Image (spheres, grey):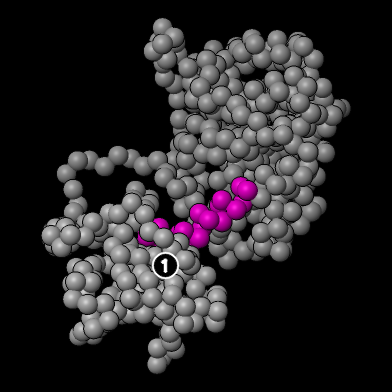
Amino acid sequence: MDFNENFLKNRAKLLELGIDPYPYSFEITHRIKDIILDEEQLKEKEISTAGRIISIREMGKACFATIEDFDSKIQIYIKKDTVGDKTWNVFKLLNPGDIIGVSGQIFRTKTGELTVYIKILTVLAKTVVEIPFGKSTDEKTYYKVKDIEIKYRERYIDWITDKQSRDRFLLRSKIISEIRKIMGSRGFIEVETPILSPVYGGAEARPFETTVHMLSNQKVFLSISPELYLKRFIVGGFPKVYTICKNFRNEGLDRNHNPEFTMMEYYETYTDYIFQMKQFETLIAELCNNLFGTTIVNYQGTKLDFTPPWKRMTMIDAIETISNVPVTKMSDPELEQFCKEHEIPIEGNFSRGIATAEIFDILCADKLIQPVFIHDYPKEISPLTKTKRGNSNLVERFEAFVLGMELGNAYSELTDPVEQLERFTEQKELQKKKNIDFVVYPLDTDFIKAIGCGMPPTGGVGIGIDRLVMILTDSSSIRDIIAFPLLKQKEEE
């Protein structure tokens, strides 16, 4: 264990003095933030507060130190003549990182620093691990933690030493809470869907699988999407439902992807994808206004304007105007040759729709910086979506893009059980041709039966919560806003 020997010795000495360095509770009268805000009312009054020591400055028979709680810090002052020998000796055994409770009165030092003059000191938690606190100024803190892996693996160290990191996760919590308020105000009911299921579907992704011992080792999958279960709620009579949940996809790790991630999906009866574009953009705009008082968000030096209405482009228009690839003028052989020349992978037999989607993903998507809806997708890649009115080769689907990454995905949901069964069957055949065992949904016959009971016209939307939080917290990597991101296991030393 990474225990500090000197800290362990100090712990032992505290025990010898009859001090329990890990007591059961401590009564505080004010948190540090309240002391700062209510300074005038608290003058000459006895107060008790608590925090973690982040620095100690010795001055002979007196000491100054700084303690910090979740959102604020304050200077404390202890004098041997005031507290007596035993308490003084206890204080001398403390180290940066220790959590203490202090009781006394507040005053201002000659330099104007608000300070708690300690009369009673209580040890609340003795650290035995050396925490890498850095030097602080009013504007910036210089941390010793330079290894980004440590910040991700030992997030508690990151939070202890970096208030900005704590603030980032506080904002994440506020974002999700605010989304729930907005959804509630729009009449949506929050529901729960299974994490473990005997089939998987709702997304093109490799699942994680395990077995259930008490069900004769039945194979089950971790959810890759809540879609098929949310649609069962719609069939059952719930008009507007949503869930904020964890999904698990056994795929890549990069600045925009984590195998375990949080998303929101919602479904609204008697609407289509056109209506849901408005719902989506106004949801994000309202969220930004509620959090920041503006729909303009700064991300890594780029100003993003979430003010509705967002730009709308078909996938074909985006490819032809942004990437300058005239796909509508190309024959199938020409399109196939273009993909080969530009190393755009097409698995299995050539498909015009799949080729178009791949060209968009590789040559166009990363150029979409400001919020935009890309709509009308090839039918081949969207088996759960209604065919586009007026064009049987496309489906009524849109994806919202910001900063070159997908932020959300939406459909006019396919509600015809016969067509849905045909689509699933076609996908299974495509699966066999490609010899792929995970991308295409297994046939969920219970889901087919459910929509066979009658599913009203429905618009459905999925939003990547982690990516949204990443943007709104101005974080450069998704790992910065996932508390405990998945990392490669360290080799034992």
Residue that sits furthest to the top in the current view: 216
Left of 450 or right of it: where is 476? left
* Residue at the far bottom in the pictured view: 110
Image location of residue 17, percent across then percent down: 15, 63
Quadrant position of residue 359: top right
User: Residue 53's x, y, as percent?
Assistant: 32, 68
Left or right: residue 410 versus residue 12 is right
Give the magenta range: 158-177
Query: In front: 337, or 246?
Result: 246
- Residue name at image x 41 percent, y 60 percent: 27
Find disc 1 in the rendering and name its residue. 49
Tell me if I can see residue 303 in this picture. yes
Depicted 285 relative to depicted 55: above or below: above
Tell me if 103 is positioned left or right of 178 in this view: left
Q: Does the magenta stretch include residue 230?
A: no
In the image, what residue occupies the spot 45% across and 30% down?
A: 250
Number of other residues with Cα within 10 Å of mark 1, as a class: few under 14, some 14 to 19, many 20 or more? many
Tell me which residue sits at (45%, 48%) in the image. Answer: 483
Image quarter of residue 204? top right
Q: Please indicate whether residue 195 sits to the left or right of residue 382 in the image.
A: left
x and y percent of residue 434 in the render?
Answer: 53, 18
Query: Main SS of the magenta segment?
Result: helix
Q: Quadrant of the C terminus?
A: top left
Is there any visible trace of residue 144 in the rendered image?
A: no
Query: Where's residue 114, x and y in %?
Result: 44, 82
Q: What residue type is labelled 1?
A: Thr
